[in-house]
């Protein structure tokens, strides 16, 4: 069963049987159907979405075959109305299931960001699905089963100066990925200097008074991350089936903005604007499939 059903308040679903009963009794019905399409081979894919609270829910995707067999997949979802990144997102299908992953090269954090695509039927409904793989515009959201609220830290660097430094670093990372040896050398020296400074400060300071934010892959699954980021907005909703209160936090980590869902009981501390969130997340995203990058188009346009 999906490990992050708990984050949207479905903690009572503890076995695969519990999940199947909930899906067939509550989710898979005509009133919840949001998409239907026929695919190669004669099978039919149907998508169902059940709203559990404001902006949160569970999605089930059922593929029915002529033989009567059915493949069923499901996942919790969290709506994010804001664009998190306009970098090119490349879509790739998971090997063993009817799901898709998105990949963007984020120079802000210096790594390729991989996430689960939560609107796969929008992609399958494209006339040229499979031929078009690159798109611009992604709304990121995430789930956590355990998190901690930390106090903010005071930065002695002026905002304009910090922004300039970050832009320079992004430019260097882009040049380094294109093989610029001078940029690679500059980044290497900067990393060594940063390591040296942290090593000295950590002797007398707490780690989280030094590190303001971080976005680091964690575990063996490619869409799991350990994040530390600033809370920009705090909202909440109540799961209409379990009465669990779900926090919906807007988080900014290394300039990546996303929405996060977590049960009130699973968050240690009181979330407020300006404080920080630390925890492990499962990352998903809604890709704007109306904005494809056509073959031969300049990716910087």
Image (spheres, rainbow, N blue to C red):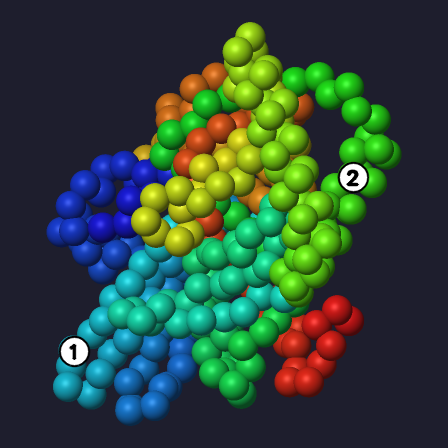
Crowd rating for badge 1 (residues with CA inside 10 Å; few <14, some 14–19, many 20+): few
| Residue positioned 79% across, 24% down in the render | 157
Q: Would you say 38 lies left or right of 269 here?
A: left
Determine whether 61 is above or below 252 in the image: below
Query: Is residue 230 in view?
Result: no
Q: Would you say 87 lies left or right of 53 here?
A: right
Q: Position of residue 175 (x, y in %)?
A: 71, 59
Q: Which quadrant would residue 93 be assigned to in this image?
A: bottom left
Residue position for label 2: 165
Q: Would you say 181 lies left or right of 70 here?
A: right
Judged from this view, the residue extending furthest toward the top is: 204
Crowd rating for badge 2 (residues with CA inside 10 Å; few <14, some 14–19, many 20+): few
Residue position for label 1: 69
| Residue positioned 46% across, 78% down in the render | 124
The count of marks equals 2
Judged from this view, the residue extending furthest toward the bottom is: 41
Which numbered tag is attached to residue 182?
none
| Residue positioned 50% across, 36% down in the render | 227
Which residue occupies the foreground of this view, 10 or 40?
Answer: 40
Q: CA distance from mark 2 to mark 1?
A: 56 Å
Q: Position of residue 162 (x, y in %)?
A: 79, 34
| Residue positioned 40% across, 77% down in the render | 36
Q: Secondary structure under badge 1?
A: loop
Determine whether 278 is above or below 222 in the image: above
Judged from this view, the residue extending furthest toward the right is: 160
Q: On the rendered image, what quadrant is the C terminus found in? A: bottom right
Q: Which quadrant would residue 6 be assigned to in this image?
A: top left
Number of the front mark, 2 or 1: 2
Q: Secondary structure under badge 2?
A: helix
Query: Is residue 142 in view?
Result: yes
Please say if the residues under marks 2 and 1 sit with CB atoms less than 8 Å apart.
no
């Amino acid at each position: 069963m999906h490990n992050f059903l708990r984050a949207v308040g479905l903690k009572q679903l503890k076995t695969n049987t519990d999940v199947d009963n909930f899906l067939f009794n509550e989710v898979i019905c005509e009133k919840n159907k949001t998409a239907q399409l026929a695919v190669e081979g004669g099978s039919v894919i149907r998508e169902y979405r059940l709203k559990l609270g404001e902006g949160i829910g569970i999605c089930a995707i059922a593929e029915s075959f002529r033989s009567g067999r059915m493949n069923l997949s499901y996942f919790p979802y969290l709506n994010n109305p804001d664009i998190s990144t306009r970098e090119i997102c490349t879509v790739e299908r998971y090997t063993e299931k009817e799901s898709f992953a998105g990949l963007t090269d984020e120079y802000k954090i210096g790594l390729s960001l991989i996430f689960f695509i939560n609107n796969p039927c929008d992609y399958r409904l494209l006339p040229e699905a499979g031929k078009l793989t690159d798109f611009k515009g992604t709304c990121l959201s995430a789930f956590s089963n355990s998190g901690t609220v930390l106090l903010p830290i005071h930065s002695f660097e002026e905002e304009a100066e910090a922004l300039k430094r970050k832009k320079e670093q992004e430019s260097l990372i882009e040049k380094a990925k294109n093989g610029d040896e001078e940029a690679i050398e500059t980044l290497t020296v900067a990393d060594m200097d940063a390591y040296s400074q942290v090593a000295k400060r950590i002797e007398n300071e707490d780690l989280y008074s030094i590190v303001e934010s971080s976005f680091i892959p964690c575990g063996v699954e490619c869409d799991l991350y350990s994040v530390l980021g600033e809370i920009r907005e705090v909202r909440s909703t109540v799961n209409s089936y379990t009465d669990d209160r779900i926090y919906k936090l807007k988080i900014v980590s290394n300039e990546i903005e996303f929405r996060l869902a977590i049960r009130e009981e699973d968050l240690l501390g009181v979330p407020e604007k300006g404080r920080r969130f630390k925890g492990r997340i499962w990352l998903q995203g809604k890709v704007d499939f109306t904005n494809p990058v056509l073959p031969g188009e300049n990716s910087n346009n």
